[in-house]
Amino acid sequence: MDLRQNNLISTVECQTEWLQERLRSDFMDNIPQARPEMDREMIEAAASALQNERLVMGESVFKFEEAFARYVGVKRAVSVSSGTDALILALLALDVKGKEVVTTPFSFIATANSVVHARGVPRFCDVRAYDYNLDVTLLPRALSGTAKAIMPVHLFGHPCDMAEMNDLAEEKGLKVIEDACQAHGALYRGRKAGALGDVGCFSFYPTKNMTVGGDGGMVTTDDEDLASSVAKLRDCGRTSRYSHDVVGFTSRLNTCNAAIGLVQLKRLDAWNERRRAIAWMYDSKLKGLPGIVLPPGEEADKRPVYHCYAILTEGREGLSRHLADRGIVTAVHYPIPIHGQAAYAEKGRGRHGDLPVSEMLSQRILSLPMFPSMTDDQVKRVCETVQSFFE
């Protein structure tokens, strides 16, 4: 490591330590709802990439893609600049223009936005109260003659019923796009999310189970032609430096971010195990408490990764204030279902009452703190504070 790189790392570490100390002094006993991880190895990897590689499409980008493909268990992974871009480019590569894509209204709005940006038409199907995921029994009624694809979301890191969805898609001649933006490492029947449909899409936003030190995303698939199409679209539609045969985008992942992602990927399984341990502690301490319903846990064919630990309670506002007053931060994922957002209600994509389970969840759901560096004492404190509210 040369002197310049060492100085850069020292500067970043000093700034990081100053910020952490400032946060500690300002919010001494606060427990955040989420906290991204960043350590010296990640900082060193970023500094090395900045000084020794091309800043765009450098060596770390391709190493990260190869490592992520191996991790998920697919032939190809193509990095992009965000999870939203992963969804958009995958949908464009599948040519959903003018066609309906059936998805959930109970997700972050980017799920449906990606369909619109790909010139498709989002059609919403309600979810199950049990696991917040698409209700497979309702899917046949949501399919029209113009449907091109089904886009399930493994919400909060809990896998969807992919076998049933894939069977329905095969019967109807549809594609399956996994929105796995919250499900890095989640398992369904022994296979990882992102390898369960025609194509998988991931986000590396800082609150996710792994990040790249900023925005980033990944498209995973066994379809070589689809992967090549996404790779071309993310890089201005290039066939060579100044030749372009499609109208593409500037949606590349920066080399520095990819270098951080490579290190984070090595930590992912351990972080997911810690999330499962935290969820188990929550389950054991909050089970049977009147006033709340716990999130779905591990099942015979599903192993979630707990991007969020989201409970249901009719006393959400009061509980959230009670926790906040005691230095515990919560979040609501999501207070308005997508079909209720002005951008979609005005287009006639849904009316109040059309999707009752999603609407109920939006009124009762509350995400408790969940991050790998959360201590057992912090989990205990959250549980005791929740208990004190209801008692």
Image: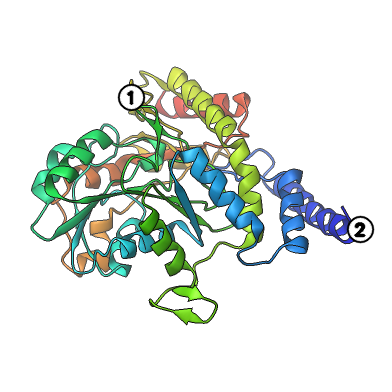
Residue that mark 2 sits on: 3
In the picture, measured across the screen, residue 49 lies left or right of residue 163, that is: right
Residue 303 is situated, as x and y percent measured from the top left of the image, at: 40, 27
Residue 159 is situated, as x and y percent measured from the top left of the image, at: 35, 35
Q: CA distance from mark 2 to mark 1?
A: 51 Å
Sequence-wise, which precedes: disc 2 or disc 1? Answer: 2
Looking at the rendering, which quadrant does residue 52 occupy? bottom right
In the picture, measured across the screen, residue 351 lies left or right of residue 268, that is: left
Is any part of residue 86 visible from this angle?
A: yes
Q: Three-letter amino acid code at disc 2?
A: Leu
Is any part of residue 161 visible from this angle?
A: no
Q: Residues within 10 Å of mark 2 (few under 14, many from 20)?
A: few
Viewer-closest of 348 and 73: 73
Residue at (60% x, 46% y) in the render: 36
In the picture, measured across the screen, residue 273 lies left or right of residue 157, that is: right
Check the picture and name the quadrant holding the C terminus.
Answer: top left
In the current view of this chain or complex, which residue is farthest to the right? 3
Q: Residues within 10 Å of mark 1 (few under 14, many from 20)?
A: few
Number of labels in the image equals 2
Secondary structure category for the residue under label 2: helix
Residue at (61% x, 50% y) in the render: 63
Compared with residue 232, is residue 129 higher up or lower down, i.e. above or below? above
Residue 55 is situated, as x and y percent measured from the top left of the image, at: 67, 66
Residue that mark 1 sits on: 301
In the current view of this chain or complex, which residue is farthest to the bottom? 242
Q: Three-letter amino acid code at disc 1?
A: Asp
Residue at (32% x, 45% y) in the render: 153
Viewer-closest of 326 and 163: 163
